[in-house]
Amino acid sequence: MTATLSLRSVTRQFGATTAVDKATLDIQPGEFVGVIGRSGAGKSTMLRLINRLVEPTSGAIFFDGAEVSAFRGRALRNWRRDCAMIFQQFNLVDRLDVLTNVLIGRLADHGFLSSMAMRFSDAERAMAIEALDRLDLLPQALQRAGTLSGGQQQRVAIAKALVQRPRIMLADEPIASLDPANASRVMDGLRQINREDGLTVLVNLHTLDTARAYCDRIIAMRAGRVMFDGTPFQLTDDVVRDIYGLDGLAEFNEAVTSTTARATGRVTEQA
Amino acid sequence: MTATADPALPAGPGDPMRAFEHAYAARRRRARIGWVVGTAIFLVLFALTSWAGDFFKVTQVTLPDGSRDWRWILPAGLPRLGEYIEKTLPALHWDSLGADLANWFWRWKIWLKLLFQTILIAFLATTLGVAGGFLLSFPAARNLAPNRWGLWLTRRYLEVARTVPELVWALIFVFCFGVGPMAGVLAIGLHACGALGKLYSEVNENIDMRPLEGVRAAGGTWFDQIRYGAVPQVLPNIVSYTLLRFEINVRSSSIIGYVGAGGLGQEFRTAMSFQEYTDLSALFLIIFATVALIDYGSEKLRHRIIGMDLDQSRRDARAQVI
């Protein structure tokens, strides 16, 4: 059970609707896992459950032998640091500069006073600068985050996630608000982190071709349940039709829903 | 009902165009009725309150020839305003202007000292009010409050602090701490804390919550979320409201001495009780000049801060293009 992330019949209800229904999964260290499904299938809630932004109604989540879903206070904050999360809308602080936004990733290790005074050590700043450099964002380091383009903001969010020194990276629809060129840059960044740092990556995607292009393993959800769990190769048209419930629609073109340029091989690299 | 005139269209109950026309006409009818009823209620209230407020009263006046007559109160009372102003104006003559002015502002040494005290009260009260209001505005905001009883407690405190008028707080604090500026500082500070806390918390309730979620997801505490996610968003508004409050507090502190809580206000009371009417106009001039000066300065400062904020964004945007 070393560093494996396990969900054991995790359920979350919002009123009468069950967003996640008895999800049971094991994510091995170093995997690049894509979660697909229709809007409202519970993908986002599942990621939030793992990061503990949402509390499970029942069930348990384990990581490295410890029950994550029972963490409170300090342990909970350390867990959130260990499983970094990036969001569809980036969730940066627009009015703070990029560097400070990245340093927010260090807050879990700070005391009250140094955090309130926005005081960070030189080592932490160096860490943040290194992360920004890795994502080609060093020239923008002192700009306000709000003035950056969507693609740049998402890479700032990845840099912030990196300085958390996480063990798992969760990404909730990280490219849904981006144009194709930026989307591939963000996905490439995630793949690079997965390969070079050996980080486990769990990413929600709404396009099949991106999932096929980047993920070792694909999990498909429908109405809160895990409907499919396997390799991209195993994800046949029949399975897809089942997941998306396209009973009436005979035609289903993956290329139409594509948002990444690289995955379809049309564009190789654009800044 | 014009759209259904087309004979090619099936005009049944399921016809969407007809259904829309119906719904649209019904909504317009409802809106019209609502407007008429609302206007009627307003007019009735307006008439009732003016009547209760003696605006239709008829009073007895003495005419120039000495006889008494009944007149509507407004034209009867307005001339007395001129009478009053005439009383408070000093007699200034060109050949003895210096002496007349000195006579008008005869207590200038005391007034200058009290003016200083007035501004001191306003400054210190604003500082205390901002500190308290700022800290309490976060637990008092529905979207940020860490728990329900914290929200309830801070909201009730802010309500009490701002509903009790400054003059009443001043009376209480004069009783506790004696006559002097300290009572004024506490009274205006407490009231400002309640008013600002409410305003700030409303600003807080309108912020974008996503940055806070980003901080929380990285392992930040509630305080981290506030400091990094909320404060940068609300800061320009806080500065603006703070300067506005300082202007208000200067006005308040110039009258609060009336109940013994320090500042120029006590002179109003003295002048009135000794019927030194020209003192009143002198004091009015001093306060008017001070408030105008502070309003002007604070407005400049506010625009400059907002402008700086815009400039910064513009610079950033330009750097982005390059």
Image (cartoon, coloured by chain):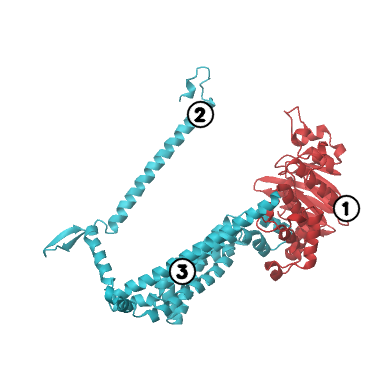
Query: At which x and y percent is residue A103?
Result: 74, 61
- Pointer 1: what residue? A196
Q: Are the residues under badges 2 and 3 in a single subunit? A: yes
Q: Is residue A206 above or below residue A69?
A: above
Chain identity of mark 1: A
Say whether disc 2 or disc 3 marks the residue closer to the N-terminus: 2
Label 2–label 3 contact, CB within 8 A = no
Q: Amino acid at mark 3?
A: Asn
B31 left or right, relative to B87: right
Q: Residues within 10 Å of mark 2 (few under 14, many from 20)?
A: some
Looking at the image, which is closer to me, A204 or A243? A204
Q: Residue B312: name its quadrant.
A: bottom right
Residue B129 in view (yes/no): yes
State the residue at coordinates (46%, 69%): B249
Q: Are the residues under badges 1 and 2 in a single subunit? A: no
Which chain is red in the picture? A
Q: Residue lying furthest front in this view? A: B95
State the residue at coordinates (80%, 56%): A133
- Pointer 3: what residue? B249
- Pointer 2: what residue? B19
Which quadrant would the N terminus of chain B be assigned to in this image? top left
| Circle 2: element type | helix
